Image (spheres, grey):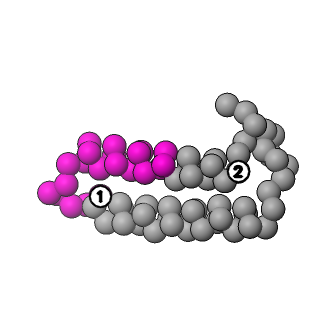
Amino acid sequence: MIKGYRELNQDETMSINKVKDLADIVGQACAVFENDVNVDKRWLAIAKTDLQKGFMSLVRSVAKPEGF
């Protein structure tokens, strides 16, 4: 068990794994722009951070941790 988390059932685990799979796909899509000289790297970094926060929030919405 992870401190602050309850035991997840199979459906919750599957849902979180789907979110993580989607996050991997989005991460790969972002990586395509890393070497593009026409892309503003600052905004790309902001986009990646916000997307990561969104996926983390989605995982937390399923896991419903007890702590901060």
**Residue placed furthest toward the left:** 38
- Which SS does the magenta portion mostly show? helix
* Amino acid type, callout 2: Ala
Q: Picture coordinates of residue 50 (x, y %)?
A: 41, 45
Q: Residue at x 69, y 68 (%)?
A: 14
Whether 31 is among the magenta residues is: no
Residues drawn in magenta? 34-54
Whether 37 is among the magenta residues is: yes
Q: Which residue is mark 1?
A: 34
Q: Picture coordinates of residue 16 (x, y %)?
A: 65, 61
Left/right of residue 43 with respect to residue 13 in the rendered view: left
Q: Residue at x 49, y 45 (%)?
A: 53
| Position of the C terminus by quadrant | top right
Q: Residues within 10 Å of mark 2 (few under 14, many from 20)?
A: some
Q: Which residue is mark 2?
A: 63
Q: Earlier in the sequence, mark 1 or mark 2?
A: 1
Cβ–Cβ below 8 Å for labels 1 and 2? no
Left/right of residue 10 with respect to residue 57 in the rendered view: right
* Amino acid type, callout 1: Glu
Q: Residues within 10 Å of mark 1 (few under 14, many from 20)?
A: some
**Residue placed furthest toward the top:** 68
Q: Residue at x 74, y 67 (%)?
A: 11
Question: Is 32 placed above or below 50 here?
Answer: below
Q: Secondary structure beneath disc 2?
A: helix
Which quarter of the picture shows residue 8?
Answer: bottom right
